Image (spheres, rainbow, N blue to C red):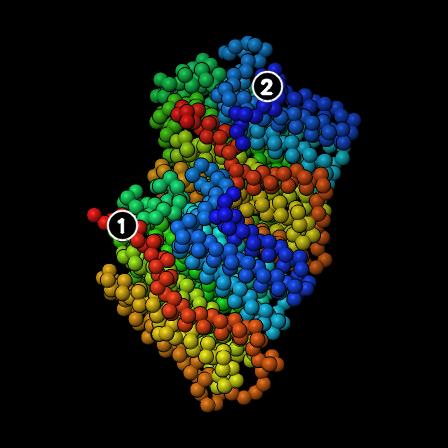
Amino acid sequence: MQLEALYVAQPALTAQAPILAIAVPLIGACAAALAPSGRAGWMISVVAAMVSAWMALAVAGEVMREGVILYQLGGFAPPAGIALRVDAMGALIALLIGAVGTLAAVFSGHSLAAEVRPEKHTLFQAGFLLAQAGMVGLVYTGDAFNAFVFLEVSSIGTYALVAAGERRDRRALPAAFNYLIMGTIGATFYVIGVGFLYGATGTLNMADMAARLGTLDQNAAVQAGFAFIVAGLGVKAAMFPLHGWLPGAYAHGPSLISLFLAATATKAAIYLMARFLFEVFPDGAAFGDMFLQWVLAPLGAAAVIVCSLQAVFARELRRMIAFSSVAQVGFIFLGFSLANASGLSAALFYMTAHGLMKAAMFMALGGLAISIGARRLEDFAGVAREAPWTAVAFGIGAASLVGTPLTMGFLAKWQIMEAALAGGRIWIFAVMAAGSVLTLVYVGRIIEVMFFREPAPGAPRAKESPVGVLVPLLILAGLSLWFGIDASLPQQLAQAGAASLFEVRP
Amino acid sequence: MNGGELLILLALTLPLFAAAMIYAVGRMPDVRETLTLVACIGLAIVAISIFVRVGQGDPPALTVAEPLPGLAIAFRVEPLGALFAVMASVLWGVNSLFSIGYMRGRREARQTRFYICFALAMFGVMGIAFAANLFTLFLFYEALTFVTYPLVTHAGTPAARRAGRVYLVTLVGASVLLFLPGIIGVQSMAGSTTFTPGGLLNGRVDAAAGSVLLLLLVFGAAKAALMPLHGWLPSAMVAPAPVSALLHAVAVVKAGVFAVLKVSAYIFGPDLISTLPAATWILWMAAGSIVIASLVALTKDDLKTRLAWSTVSQLAYVTSAAMLPMASGLVAGGLHMVFHAVAKITLFMCAGAIYVATGANRVSEIGGLGRRMPWVFVAFLAASFAIVGLPPMAAMWSKFLLITASFGSGEWFTAAALIASSLLSLVFLMPVAFRALFSPAGDGAGGEFVRPGGTPVTSLVALCVTAAACVVLFVAVEPLADYLAPIAAVSFMETAP
């Protein structure tokens, strides 16, 4: 599919699409908070998320045709006005957020009833839309401080959403608190870093900042700002070893939030980090290269190995997949650390692949959670017999996670490994191979329990997920398969995004 | 869509369609088994048509999808693949005939699943045989692992499940850790993984990088059971005899050595192979594999396990052939792949026939049995001759060519290992048939058959057909060798001054 030829909205609407993709969920959040019933809140949520995704698709088509889109709010030019600046990389991540957000919103119709107190449903939907608006804004903005604002908007939503899981699992409360503290520290670090850069350059607009930083790479304030920014975003992105908040938040929050966070929240932070690493900071700055070589690459490798091992030995299924998420972030950082266009393009592709597969896996578990309140891996014995469709969708997500050929995950791993080899980084290649085997071990354990083991006598029987869950679930799983056979859509965005950051237009 | 594309598509979809149909009629054993046989015949006809087309210089090709630029799921048939497909599809038919008798005679459970997995395995084999690049080969190679896993664990006992785990861990582990990195390495060096006559990497890599890639790809193809990655094969013998016969003598293990041959002929090319130090190391490993596996086979009393160790040894013949610094080794390897398959499937079917009739599965239990089961043991004797490499059996030729090629290229170590293993196989195979046929009295001489009537007729027919094939191929060796000649000849022409 060629995105250049994709026109999903009138030109006049497309011109306003970047802001609509942010504003519609934001307004929707207010409306959902005031909605008379949970049902109405759900409908608002679905419509707003869907419009946002639609706009994101329109933006993606426009970006492929025009290159970078600049959108000035109210027509005021930066530095005074607020500017949105969308390139192919941002278009790809926003599209992922929109697509997963829409499917998650549809899914929430059933899952909330089982997991969240009824009187909280409208507020839950409001928080969810807030999170989505914040993330899309974070991805689209061209302003370092606005990025902080959007980061906090989305985080406020997600802190509350994690805590809403307390009805089913009391551990959601400490997990949410933990997440709140860690996330706030991360955001504070980020804003301190931006302050340093503002002091050094006198601008908050990322493009201007990049232009003025060109000669400032020996400036101590710039270097301190860099350190604060990558550390702060490292917390938000669950960069090993700053990932402590993640397993709890994913494992104990409502399943909707695990799936939405896993697919999008860390991705948005990783995206912002890529912006700073490859665009804002001067090319070839010694500290940037040093960070990539000596910090990001070893930490990525450590995440791949350590967190995969933690996943192997985890006893609760959702915790297992949460650890796996940290390990996958490691894979993405390994792609970044290659510091070239093919590595970045592969990492962006991996982010998309991982978002889709993890969303499918968490959604499948959410579908099962409606009928069985299982947590431990053994409780899922034989669910494939009772809920075959849900189990198959989970299996497709898991296959993509392992990197089975004909799934998107395979192409993602393939690209990073090929880029590592082309860059002469044999050790990264070896870590990736070892990480893939560890992934195979824990995923194999899950598959064996779900598909080949007899259910324990007397255990609650799983039921097939309702249609409202199955449809979004199968769409997610189908996307992992479809992009494994024809990857042109994410591939062209990832490639164009990486190329524009490294300024080698294909 | 032209005729060639259609044929490839048929070869791939026919087994899938057969699997679906078998599932649909699973409750009616007669219909189910008739369907299997019809599918076997159909597939054999398709494979033979492709074989003929390739011989006429009109190789079928088909591209299915291209997920990323330079990474395509594509098929293109060359002589080695055409021969492999014919061998597998014809032996599938024979083996199905045998299975019908065996599975009914043993009253095995889950027979529908058994036939479905066989059909799916054939889908994997056809994909491997016709793959146009390493990536496509890898896809079907992995698929073959997963669809044959339920067959290994068919019995459902703890031992079977343990064997299944070893099977999966070894094969998938080697694929992910060695084979796939090797493929990505090839892609990174050459920009594609297409099988190219004369060698894709020829002239593009230095000796060090080439050696690493060769080691990754040869050991990564763990289905070839080259030591030290051979352990899964003897343990997989817990599977029913038809599974051992078709998969662990023909489809699965031959997919491994087939991959090694393809990598040698089309990824590296004979010229590059002859300059790589790693090829020599692999030759030594293979020589060790040949001798050690034969020695271990001597010590095994369980008949199928003994045969499995012999397979490990014989597979290393083919790996050696692929690594010889002489292009004619490839032809010898291709021929041995086929001739060994025919002989070994016979031996396994004989073992199965003995087991279904008498319940005996140990060499020590079969003394004197030959008087009651003369056909089975005559076939066994004939196939033993073939494994040893005696005339008038086809495998004599391939062994002869192989020894000549190893001497010719100065690899006397390999030649010595081949001769030693021939003598050893004489010692561990001949006594089996002799004991049964000529020992005047033994455990098996008297008593009743476990199954009334002894070996089922269909099984008997099947094993006699393959035993006869060993002899028939003895006289048909020349056309086959000529057919395979192009895979080696290209490099002769290119290197000619």
Q: Is residue B225 above or below residue A88?
A: below
**3D distance between C-alphas at marks 2 and 1:** 61 Å
Three-letter residue code for mark 2: Thr
- Residue shown at 40% from the left, 45% from the top: B194
Q: Chain letter for mark 1, please.
A: B
Q: Which residue is nearer to you in this view: B485 or A371?
A: B485
Q: As drawn, which residue projects farthest toward the front?
A: B56
Q: Are marks 2 and 1 in contact (CB under 8 Å)?
A: no
Horizontal side of A358 relative to A40 (left or right) equals: left
Q: Position of residue B409 (x, y in %)?
A: 24, 60
Q: Secondary structure at mark 2?
A: helix
Q: Chain letter for mark 2, please.
A: A
Q: Position of residue A233 (x, y in %)?
A: 50, 29
Q: Say if residue A288 shows up in the picture.
A: yes
Residue B355's image quarter? bottom right
Q: Is residue A306 above or below residue B274?
A: above
Q: Nearer the viewer, mark 2 or mark 1?
A: 1
Q: Is residue B314 above or below residue B199?
A: below
Q: Position of residue A382 (x, y in %)?
A: 65, 55
Numbered label attached to residue A430: none
Three-letter residue code for mark 1: Met
Which residue is denoted by mark 2 in the rendering? A14
Q: Which residue is nearer to you in this view: B452 or B425?
A: B452
- Residue shown at 37% from the left, 62% from the top: B479
Q: Badge 1 local density, few (<14 within 10 Å), some, or many (20+)? A: few
Which residue is denoted by mark 1 in the rendering? B493
